[in-house]
Structures are given as C-alpha cells and as structure tokens.
Image (tube, rainbow, N blue to C red):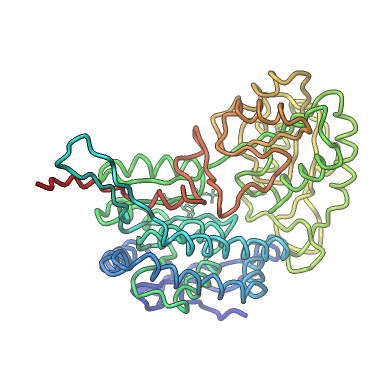
Amino acid sequence: MFENETKSIFINGKWRNVDSQQTDTIYNPATLKPITKVAYGGANETEEAIKAASEAFQLWGEMTGRERSRILYKAHELMLEEVDRLGEILTIEQGKPIKEAKGEIKGAASFLLWYAEEASRAYGEWIPSSNKSKRLLVIPQPVGVVGAITPWNFPASMITRKIAPALAAGCTIVLKPAPETPLSAIEIVKILERAGMPNGVVNLVTGDAEAIGNTMLTSKEVRLITFTGSTEVGKHLMRESADHVKKLSLELGGHAPIIVFDDADIDKATTLALASKFRNNGQTCICANRIYVHDSVKDIFTQQLTKKVEKLKIGYGLDDDTDLGPLINQQASEKVQKHLDDAIEKGAAIVTGGDKWSGDMEGYFYQPTVLSCISDDMLIMNEETFGPVMPIQTFTDEKTAIQNANNTDYGLAAYIFTETTSRAIRVSEKLEYGIVGVNDVFPAVAEAPFGGIKQSGVGKEGGHYGMDEFLEMKYVSMGIE
Ligand code: ADP
C-alpha cells in the first residue's frame, strides 16, 4: 500500500520532498512497525508555500463563490468514492478501529459538502443610512493566506473542518498536519488536486513543527492561523501572533464532564457515556473526562456501564470487530498510567480494567478502565487524560453538580443525561462550555458551531459561523451627491 518513501510536500501544484532529503518515519501505532517515510520540511519549504498561497490568492479570492463551490462539491464526491481506502490509511497511521475511521472520512467529506453549499452564500449588508446623501455597504472578503495546523486524533476531519470553510470564503492555505499522521493529509490534498484546485491554493508542508509554525507566525502574508491541538501550543501561537496582529482560530484542550441525573434513562445513559469515553480510545478533545452520577442511581449506572465496558474488544484497528485500538504513542500511554497511579494513590478503586493490555501486538494498548471513590484533587479530575479511563463521582443536588462541572479552566464540551426538558434547558444555560450535549455525545457536525470558551479556545468551526472566521467585513461608506 505504501512506498518506502512518500512525497509529502505540495507547493504550487507540485509534489516533492525537501532538498536535503531529510525524512521522518511514520509508524503504525498498533504494531510499531514503520509504514513509510515522509519529508521533513522546515522554514524554507514553508516560505515557498506561503509565497505560492499568496500569489494564488489573487485568483482564488476573486473567483465567484459558485466557481469555488464546484471544486469543493467535486472533492466531496471523490472523498466519498474512497471511504474504504481512506479509512484504511487512517487506521494504519492513527490506530482507531476501521468503523470509526470510515465514519471520520464520511464526516470529513461532510465539511466539503456543507461549505460547497455555503460558498455562494457569503452575504453582505446594506445599512440604512441616517444621512440621505450616503449609502452604507458591508462586503465580506476573504482574510487572505491561512496557516492551518492540525492534530493526530482526527487526521482527516480536522483538516476539512478548517480548509473547506477557508476555501469557500476565498482564502488560500498552507497546511501543516500532525507529524504522527501525515498520510491522511496527503490523500486529502490529492483529492483537492484531482477536483481541480488551482495551483498554489492548497499547499502542504510536513516536518519540523516549530520551524513551520514560526515561519507562519513571522510571515506578514499569513493573515490567520487556524489550529487544533494542546492549550499549551495554542497559547504559544497566541503570544507569538501579536507582532503581526494575526487573526486566530483555536480549538484547544477540554475536560468534559457528564452529569447523570436521577431521572436519566440509565440504559441510554450508560451506552452514551461509554461511546463518549471510549471513542477513539478516549483521545478526543470532547471525550468525557469526568462522570458525575446522582447518588441514587450510582450503583445501577456503574453496574450497567461495567457490563458494557467489559464487552469492548481491544485489538488491531483493521479487524472489523475491534472497538478499541492503541494509544497514539508512548507519551500518551505514560500519561494514562500517571493519572491512574495518582488516582489509586489518592484512594480510587478500580471497578474494571486498570492495566495495560497484553495482547499480541507491540503498540500502546490499554484496558478500558472504570474508577470509583474519586476525589476532586486527583489529576484525572483536573487534567485531560486522553485515554480510556473513566472516573465516576457522585452528587446529590443539581447546584453542586453544575458547580463541579464548571470548576475547571477548560470550557469545550459538557454533557447532561436527563429526561426532564426544563432541567435540560436550565442546566445547559448554566454550564460554562461552548458545547452542551443533552442525551447526545456526538455534537460535532458540519452544520453547527463547534468551539470552546475559557482556555479551550477562541472561534468556531462548522456552520456559517465557521466560515465567518475566514471573512473580513469591509465597510464602504458612499457619498452619492
Ligand atoms: P498533541 O500533544 O496532542 O500532539 P500539540 O498541540 O503538540 O498536541 O500538536 C498539535 C499540532 O500542533 C501538531 O500538528 C503539532 O505538530 C503542532 N505543533 C506542536 N508544536 C508546535 C509549535 N511550536 N508551533 C506550531 N505547531 C506546533
């Protein structure tokens, strides 16, 4: 499926490697075997890519929305034709089960479709003037060259969620994917190429994150950086963009709570909690990190949940019946172990799991784990675990549950399970989060705004809000006499 070396730098319509032939080996996280090598680019390649994007902006930015949308529609079709192949590539480089990988590819394609539709709907405004001899117009215009930096946990959908609205708006792009998962990025760029994207509109640079990032940050041409990743790197990008007053769109870490009220449908609640926590092996920024269960339903919730968790099958992502793949790397495995050790030391009890999985593969597999006897001072209740460990704590009144849920610097997603509509509305309004799921743990869809508050980020992705990020509203004041 893969050559020994894969061309991974795409600038001004041409695929190549770096001049110095420096490479980076990509590993399958399940087997720890090398898959292929990609180019290790840096400042030079990024500068060239920015120049190409800047030149292409003249043409792309002036095309009509309808012209741009045709290419996005085509890319959407091409991506759906290849769900199986692209899903396999995603599983091989990232580890997630094939059913989740194919789901991600379909999700990635849905952003292309949504923004193909949205490209011709960037409306301006005609403001009624208080002066008879003037006319006041607001016209939306593309921001310019965009630097897009993406993570490894969703190697396909995090890319299209950024570049589809940017392209629809008329922006051009320099994309830097995560070093762990460049192969899905390469495939997406190839699809855009086949769909007829003009040269220079989308450019791809793999390699040295810091060098590529710094070149984007210090370039006057790059007008906006759109980033998904850790809060730490997000803060760095924010600080360093100050010199050129760049626009930023940041999707950072989360620490999602689930509140299970006493009126919840427990069968549904346990299925949803499991889906939220163990999807992508817990490596999702909106994954539940803390579960607060009403004291009166804690026993039944824990029993039902544990039964379902114990049925999950760990294994190789390409096997159809696998539910949990490996963690992405050793660092991820160490973090899970650290959170678990800390919780146990502070009094947590293991309900199920609690150890590495010793199967027949080399990768960093971990048993799906449920913990009880949880206290607020445990690391797992305060830091993002990014792994398959679920701590369950109890509460007795609604007010305390909300306070506990809000007691964090993060504010990405929160979930509540209840069958009472008034409670659903009341609690949703009080939760300090950008996204609230009520009896729903899959809120991320192309047509709705996804984004955090507090230290979970700035800006929105998805829906018409997602396209607004890439548009400047120019005000034209016209004297007509
Ligand atoms: P994670 O810990 O989940 O890998 P990161 O925030 O480190 O999250 O990575 C998200 C993305 O940010 C990746 O593409 C990574 O290469 C990139 N990245 C990491 N450090 C920097 C940096 N200093 N400048 C620009 N991009 C960076």
* Residue 45 spot, x, y in % from top left: 33, 67
Where residue 110 sits: x, y (%)? Answer: 57, 62
Q: Quadrant of residue 432?
A: top right
Is 281 positioned to the left or the right of 228 in the image? Answer: right
Q: Quadrant of the N terminus?
A: bottom right
Vertically, is 11 above or below 281?
A: below
Residue 215 seen from this side: no
Residue name at image x 41 percent, y 58 percent: 166
Q: What residue do we see at 41% from left, 66% from top?
A: 205
- Answer above or below: position of 219 versus 132: below
Q: Could you say which is closer to the camera, residue 319 or residue 260?
A: 260
Can residue 164 be seen from the camera position used here?
yes
Image point 60% across, 52% down: which residue? 445
Q: Is residue 206 left or right of residue 277?
A: left
In this view, the residue in front, 185 or 206, is: 185
User: Could you say where residue 201 lies in the image, as x and y percent from the top left?
Assistant: 36, 69
Residue in view at x 50 percent, y 77 percent: 6
Q: Does 113 appear above or below 196? A: above
Rendering quarter of residue 396: top right
Q: Tell me: residue 221, above or below residue 93.
A: above
Q: Measured from the top left, where is residue 88 in percent x and y?
A: 66, 71
Q: Residue furthest left?
A: 481
Q: How many numbered callouts?
A: 0
Quarter-of-image position of residue 54: bottom left
Of residues 457 and 19, the one nearer the viewer is 457
